[in-house]
Image (cartoon, rainbow, N blue to C red):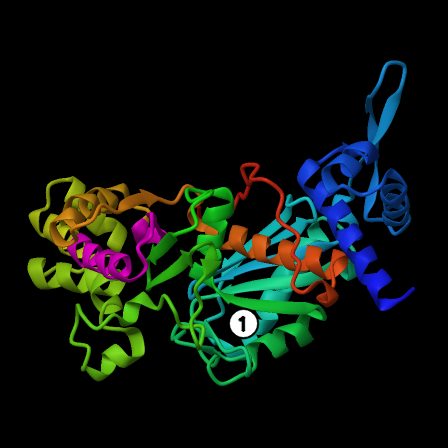
């Protein structure tokens, strides 16, 4: 077959797979109608995809009078991806099939030793999940790892991740690929979270969207005109390094960020101790604020004001339609209510602020989206198509039962 003929065939295969992915159970006649391909071409492609094990018959539906049509669907377990949300304190993994269904999940505390210990832990976490469902390892075709930092594409290092020791000095992507024996994609965790919200959560069908995670640290994932903003060194959205809050010229602000030092958990606990003379964890501070503790309430007010300023900074530059709050602190309704009160006082244009419905699963769902799109494209598309992409299935209410959520 000539190069032109091969490219034409690939376009046709991609169109057929797109119809099947989006349509669920669909007949050859419906595929032909949707794609504009001839019935003969569709039949040939469907037959080959069935032989190769990617699709299967899924029953019959009524066609014209006295006739029925054979329906086809994707074979969900033809391949899987591993989706991992690696945090400074917890590592979560989910194994997903081609139909976007979670088939296994595992969670464990992140190894504090960092480096290769965490690499081996991620691999072990994924293989435990795979073994629990008796999935053949060779069917895991891709792993997507969300990390709290800035992945360096050329070196594989992860920068700006102080809670993951050694990741800034090693080829994390290469080490993970070697440990797992599959292709590995590394992405910033809040970037994955904003993709997850855009696909399955609060930001569906919104092209200009921001996701802010507030917890041990703070970070922002940003979609502008439907595209993920990564920046020149994949550091876009490192909200913790906004140069206000704590003294940005303090050497400590170069490590953890001036803004992070006042909005994340350490800053909240430090302010409460300074006001009350007592030490307390963040959940306790929220509880005491709800019980009428004036010092705790003042701390939450100050935190919400800082966060409102951060949202204002994002809105002034990127103009998102909606800002979604996540993370262990960002998900607290008490903080959301305060931010909604203070934001109009420091920013002149309306900005909708909402709470993430996906909770701790947002980054995992985003990793699933990246992984499924990447895998679909690798299996059913080609570079010859000039970047032609297969879209994800419609949102279906992703079911993740992540421990601790």
| Quadrant housing residue 31 | top right
**Mark count:** 1
Q: Position of residue 253 (x, y in %)?
A: 24, 77
Magenta region, mostly helix, strand or loop?
Answer: helix
Mark 1: give few (<14), some (14-19) or many (20+) Cα within 10 Å: many
Location of mark 1 (residue): 118
Q: Residue at x 80, y 43 (%)?
A: 37
Please give left or right for residue 96 compared with residue 227 in the image: right
Vertical position of residue 64 compared to residue 386: above or below: above
Q: Position of residue 368 (x, y in %)?
A: 58, 53
Please give left or right for residue 314 compared with residue 201 in the image: left
Highlighted range, magenta: 304-330
- Using the image as rendered, state which of residue 324 and residue 65 is in the foreground: 65
Vertical position of residue 331 compared to residue 29: above or below: below
- Using the image as rendered, state which of residue 121 and residue 144 is in the foreground: 144
Q: Residue at x 17, y 40 (%)?
A: 290
Q: Position of residue 65 (x, y in %)?
A: 86, 14
- Residue 403 shows in the view: no
- Using the image as rendered, state which of residue 377 and residue 135 is in the foreground: 377
Q: Does residue 324 show up magenta in the picture?
A: yes
Q: Position of residue 376 (x, y in %)?
A: 70, 55
Q: Does residue 322 show up magenta in the picture?
A: yes
Is the N terminus in the top left, top right, bottom left or bottom right quadrant? bottom right
């Amino acid at each position: 077959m000539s190069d032109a003929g091969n490219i034409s065939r690939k376009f046709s295969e991609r169109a057929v797979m797109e119809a099947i992915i989006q349509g669920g159970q669909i007949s050859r006649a419906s595929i032909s109608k949707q794609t504009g391909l001839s019935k003969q071409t569709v039949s040939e492609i469907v037959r080959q995809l069935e032989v190769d094990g990617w699709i299967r018959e899924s029953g019959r539906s009524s066609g014209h009078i006295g006739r029925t049509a054979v329906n086809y669907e994707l074979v969900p377990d033809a391949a899987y991806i591993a989706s991992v949300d690696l945090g400074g304190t917890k590592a979560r993994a989910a194994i997903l099939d081609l139909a976007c269904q979670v088939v296994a999940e595992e969670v464990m505390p992140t190894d504090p030793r960092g480096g290769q210990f965490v690499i081996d832990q991620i691999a072990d976490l994924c293989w435990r999940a795979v073994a629990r469902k008796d999935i053949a390892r060779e069917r895991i075709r891709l792993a997507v790892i969300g990390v709290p930092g800035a992945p360096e594409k050329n070196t594989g290092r992860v920068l700006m991740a102080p809670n993951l020791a050694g990741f800034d000095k090693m080829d994390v992507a290469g080490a993970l690929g070697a440990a797992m024996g599959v292709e590995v994609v590394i992405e910033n965790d809040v970037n994955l979270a904003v993709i997850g919200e855009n696909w399955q959560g609060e930001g569906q069908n919104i092209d200009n969207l921001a996701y802010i995670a507030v917890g041990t640290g703070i970070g922002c994932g940003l979609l502008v005109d439907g595209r993920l903003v990564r920046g020149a060194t994949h550091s876009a959205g490192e909200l913790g390094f906004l140069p206000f809050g704590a003294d940005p010229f303090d050497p400590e602000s170069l490590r953890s960020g001036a803004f992070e030092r006042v909005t994340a958990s350490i800053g909240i606990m430090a302010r409460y101790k300074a006001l009350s003379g007592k030490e307390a964890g963040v959940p306790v501070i929220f509880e005491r604020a709800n019980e009428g503790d004036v010092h705790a309430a003042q701390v939450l007010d100050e935190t919400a004001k800082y966060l409102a300023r951060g949202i204002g900074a994002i809105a002034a530059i990127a103009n998102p339609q909606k800002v979604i709050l996540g993370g262990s602190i960002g998900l607290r309704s008490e903080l959301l209510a305060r931010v909604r009160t203070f934001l109009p006082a420091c920013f002149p244009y309306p900005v909708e602020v909402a709470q993430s419905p996906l909770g701790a699963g947002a980054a995992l769902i985003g990793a699933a989206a990246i992984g499924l799109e990447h895998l679909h494209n690798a299996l059913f598309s080609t570079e010859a198509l000039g970047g032609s992409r297969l879209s994800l299935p419609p949102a279906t209410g992703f079911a993740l039962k992540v421990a601790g959520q």
